[in-house]
Structure formats: C-alpha cells, structure tokens
C-alpha cells in the first residue's frame, strides 16, 4: 500500500474529526484511530492461529509447504492468492517456510486493516450511503466536499495539481464506474469508492 493511500485516510479521518468537533461534544463521533494505527505485525493470537494452520498442513513436519499447499492454506484462511501471486511464488522454485508464510499473512492482515480504514475514510463523504462520492470534475470541482477537504485540511493539504495527479493515477488505471455506469466517473465526478480503494491497494 502506498504512502498516498495512508495520507488520504489520514486527511479524510482528520476532516471527519474536525467536522464532528464543530458539531459540539454532544455529537462528537471522532474515532480514536490515531495516525493510521495499523498493526505492525500479527497479534499473538493471530500468530498462534496461523502457525497451527500451517502445522496442520505440514503433515511431515518439514517446516515447509509447496506452492500448491500454500495456495490451499491461504484460501482456507480467506486470503486466496491471485494468479499473479501464484506465478511469482512458482517462479522462485522453492518451498515456503513457516516464517515466509507468517510474513505473508502479516502483510495480508495489514492490507485488510488499511482497506477498512480507507473505506471508513471515504464513507465520511458518502452522505447518502450510496457507495459513491463526488470528487468533482475539472469544470465543476468546488461543489465537491471531498475536493474541498483534501485541498484545505491537514498540515500539508493537496494543491489543485497534486489532487489532479493523485486522482489521475488511479482513474487512468481502468474505467472506474460511476452512478451513470462504467467509465463515466471522469465525466460526472461520481466515483464508486470501493473500486477506487481496490485500485489504490494495488499500487
């Protein structure tokens, strides 16, 4: 996950906290998340759970799994490997140690935590809970709360160019669907942010 993704979540959460504070203590709902408090590694419970899962599949107690066995294990834990990941693992032409597996799971769990934070950050701007936010268009961006907050809040808010560059990096990746259908987000500024988060986590 990129530094840009972390920055986006921090800024969006900051806007949420500031807006909540302006509404007064009685309606304060600022989550105590800190500066993207993502797990640095596995918890003891997770490490124990994943170690046991590894050992259950390692019938001969070699301390290693084949790429196929790793694929089976990851799928059973809800972290199925993509075809690209399988090709990369197979290209290494070696079995996977328990330490390798635990490192992989730590990264997967951190990615899940970051995805949750990003989705929470975007929901701040999804007032009608439609799954879409308005990021504005080049001709009419100032009515976008998302644009306004991203270019005004935090110690180092985005400039207009930085915002355009930041969004273009992901919008150019593939046609991001909007309310009007696939590929129309650039036209109306309405973005399905679950798709956008998925693109961000690929970077």
Image: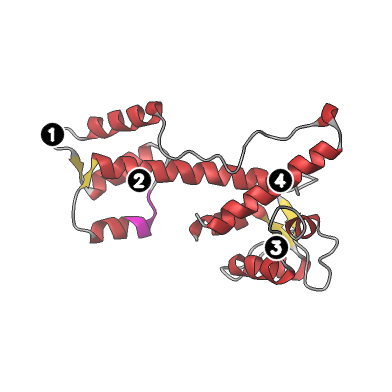
As helix, strand or loop, the secondary structure at mark 4 comes to helix
Say which label, 1 or 2, has the lower sequence index: 1
**Residue at the spot 39% in from the left edge and 41% down from the top edge:** 106
Q: Residue 116's quadrant in the figure?
A: top right
| Distance (Cα) linking label 1 and label 2 | 22 Å
Instruction: Specify start and end residues of the magenta stretch as a single range.
Output: 81-85
Describe residue 84's horizontal placement relative to residue 159 as left or right.
left
Mark 3 is surrounded, within 10 Å at the Cα level, by few (under 14), some (14 to 19) or many (20 or more) other residues, namely many
Residue 119 part of the magenta segment: no
Residue occupied by mark 1: 60
**Residue at the spot 52% in from the left edge and 55% down from the top edge:** 201
As helix, strand or loop, the secondary structure at mark 1 comes to loop
Residue 6 position in % (x across, y down): 58, 51
Residue occupied by mark 3: 158
Answer yes or no: is residue 201 visible: yes
Answer yes or no: is residue 183 visible: no
| Distance (Cα) linking label 2 and label 4 | 30 Å
Residue 82 part of the magenta segment: yes
Say which label, 3 or 1, has the lower sequence index: 1
Describe residue 90's horizontal placement relative to residue 36 as left or right.
left
**Residue at the spot 54% in from the left edge and 56% down from the top edge:** 3
The mark found on residue 14 in the picture is 4
Of circles 1 and 4, the one toward us is 4
Describe residue 137's horizontal placement relative to residue 111 as left or right.
right
Residue 56 position in % (x across, y down): 24, 30
As helix, strand or loop, the secondary structure at mark 3 comes to loop
| Distance (Cα) linking label 1 and label 4 | 51 Å
The mark found on residue 34 in the picture is none
Q: Where is 150 relative to 100, above or below?
A: below
**Residue at the spot 25% in from the left edge and 57% down from the top edge:** 90
Residue 156 position in % (x across, y down): 68, 58
């Amino acid at each position: 996950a990129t530094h840009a993704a972390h920055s986006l979540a921090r800024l969006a959460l900051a806007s949420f906290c500031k807006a909540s504070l302006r509404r007064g203590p009685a309606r304060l709902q600022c989550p105590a998340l800190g500066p993207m408090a993502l797990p640095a590694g596995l918890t003891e419970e997770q490490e124990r759970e994943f170690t046991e899962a590894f050992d259950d599949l390692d019938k001969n107690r070699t301390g290693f799994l084949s790429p196929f066995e790793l694929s089976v294990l990851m799928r059973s834990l809800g972290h199925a490997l993509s075809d690209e990941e399988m090709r990369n693992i197979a290209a290494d032409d070696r079995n996977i140690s328990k330490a390798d597996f635990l490192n992989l799971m730590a990264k997967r769990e951190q990615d899940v935590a970051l995805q949750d934070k990003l989705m929470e950050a975007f929901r701040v701007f999804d007032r009608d809970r439609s799954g879409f936010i308005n990021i504005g268009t080049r001709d009419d961006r100032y009515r976008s709360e998302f644009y306004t907050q991203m270019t005004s809040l935090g110690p180092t808010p985005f400039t207009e160019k930085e915002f355009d560059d930041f969004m273009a990096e992901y919008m150019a990746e593939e046609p991001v669907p909007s309310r009007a259908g696939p590929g129309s987000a650039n036209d109306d500024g309405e973005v399905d942010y679950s798709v956008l988060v998925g693109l961000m986590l690929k970077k």
